[in-house]
Amino acid sequence: MQVSVRSRTALAFVHDVVAASFAWCAAFWLRFNLEVPEPHFSAMLASLLWVVPLQATVFWLFGLYRGIWRYASVADVQRIVFAVLVAAMAVAMVLTLQGRPTGVPRSVLILDPLLLAMAMGGSRMLYRIWRERRQARSGAARSVYVLGAGDAAAGLIKEFSRSGEWRVAALFDDNAGRHGRSIHGVKVLGPLDMLGDALPSAPATHAIIAMPSASHRDRKRAADLATAAGLQVLTVPSFDDLVSGKVTVSQIRAVELDDLLGRDPVVLDGDGLKGWIAGRVVMVTGAGGSIGSELCRQIARFEPRLLVMVESSEFALYQVEQEFTGQGHARTPVAAIAGDVRSPVRMAQVLSRFRPTVVLHAAAYKHVPLMETDNCAEAVLNNVAGTWSVARAAIDAGVEKFVLVSTDKAVNPTNVMGATKRLAEIVCERLQETTSGTRFVMVRFGNVLGSAGSVIPRFRDQIAAGGPVTVTHPEITRFFMSIPEAAQLVLQAGLMGKGGEIFVLDMGEPVRIADLARSMIRLSGFSEDEIRIVYSGLRPGEKLFEELLADDEQTLPTPHPKLRIAQARQAPDGFLERLRSWLDALQAGSTGDVTADGADDGAVKRRLAGFVPEYDPQGVAPAAMEEPGHAGVAR
């Protein structure tokens, strides 16, 4: 039966009035060894008529009835003790003002507040204990292990004891000094690798990783041990979220792929980025994509005067524009610009109108298999001609810095997408030699978790459909980082770049895609017997292993631990003129690469190989790779 808030308040108030009456009488009985003589008995009854109302008034004024008994805490008891002491002083003051013998012994004024504080505080704590034990016995609470025995674990245990939703069966921590100890009555059984051994004696169905400040490596190990023990894994929010006040420890959530594959937080030069961006106009191309939109979010943190978002997809532009005109980013002025980066006229219009200080060029076709067949010419025009178009307009508009978002697939490329991105890098390098006003910076990184076209959304959909999960090859590996980390490091590289550098991001260790699929299956609560993994074979243009540096490239360190500078080969004289001639002809359809039936993919790949000699296209005869007049950089 549910009791209204008003009724609970009335019951608590009546309880305290009764407790105050009892404490006042009990103080007399204790003072006179349970036999109160006359005239003290009459004095006790007479004073009771004004002492209890006075005390009740003090309790009400101190807000003792705003809390709920089942959530009674030490803070509530402290408030009660303080209110009782104030009430005791008020009673003593009234007796003093009466100025004559009242029949109330002074010892009663000491005994009464002691008895009253015990009655009021003790009853509340006993009620809470009784309710929590009743909930635990009812079986409604789910049994859970907590991994980590620090402050986060202590907070969880206290929170769970109030809600009754979870019952902590045991704690585990790799710190040997905590083994055998207890936190709020829950024992630390041992290290994390004892999870499976503890299940028979202390059964549980879930495990919560309560290690918000631990490294991703340690949290991943905890998740792996819990899933291996057959437990469903949850986690508390990250340390950054807890410190920022966005969430509390009790807001547990399912373990995401970022928790398993993520890395330690990126340390940014916040002051430097603020000085670079604050109060300035910043433009992002491809602003509706996964990287472009995250770049916009990160840029908004540093308070630009105007954020210019350029996007060719109307729907994507609408989505990102709605996000930035909503409450979350209402203080960041934005301009949502529909436009194709391949249009020199449109890019010149946009840049001359807004005059941005910084341009981040994230617009690109980046899906490897799609660009490999039937779309080769479009990949060249979008990724190469589009970059050239925006870069040329940036120079003309006096942009201070142009940042090209590149990819690890530009290294020793075996696909059209990678070759076009390497060619875009070369365009920026050569344009840097023609100007001292605009500084060009290139940034390479690998796959990002959950980005458009990545395997993560596809695996998630396949698992939701009951499988199977398709992986191209058992040994295929990729580098991964989170979208926010990639965007933050792009900004950091842009800030540090002096002009002409190719920055390479620290992508960590490569991840086997088959292992990634297995992790996602486990995180979804299934086993590999329920959701199968099947191997479909490498798709056109795919490599088994991605690289961040070409064979003859070396890197130089930077002040930032996650950024290095690649020393790439230089393009020969006349390179841009030959490339411009081909791009113009490709755009006009007046080259042998384009026929009446459309683009000849083989011809486009051969031309690309002439400009990017490290490009090793699949399915193209080696003898036809080099074409007169289009020789690229010497190997």
Image (cartoon, rainbow, N blue to C red):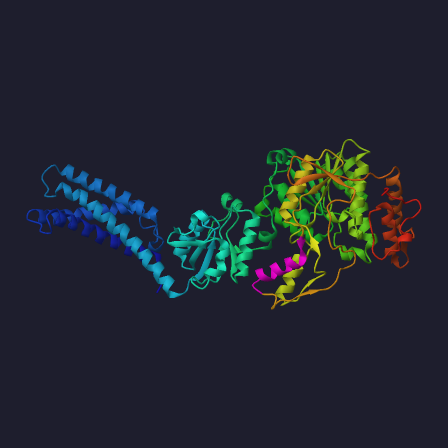
Q: Is residue 258 above or below residue 359?
A: below
Q: Is residue 14 left or right of residue 587?
A: left
For the residue pair 260 and 191, the one nearer the viewer reads as 191
Q: Quadrant of residue 143?
A: bottom left
For the residue pair 540 and 454, the one nearer the viewer reads as 540
The residues colored magenta run 511-526
Whole-percent x, y for residue 569 in the image: 81, 39
Q: Is residue 608 left or right of residue 284?
A: right
How many callouts does the rendering have?
Answer: 0
Whole-percent x, y for residue 447 in the image: 69, 51
Whole-percent x, y for residue 304 in the image: 63, 38
Q: Is residue 515 magenta?
A: yes
Q: Is residue 174 magenta?
A: no
Q: Is residue 243 left or right of residue 69?
A: right
Whole-percent x, y for residue 235 in the image: 51, 54
Quadrant for the N terminus in the image:
bottom left
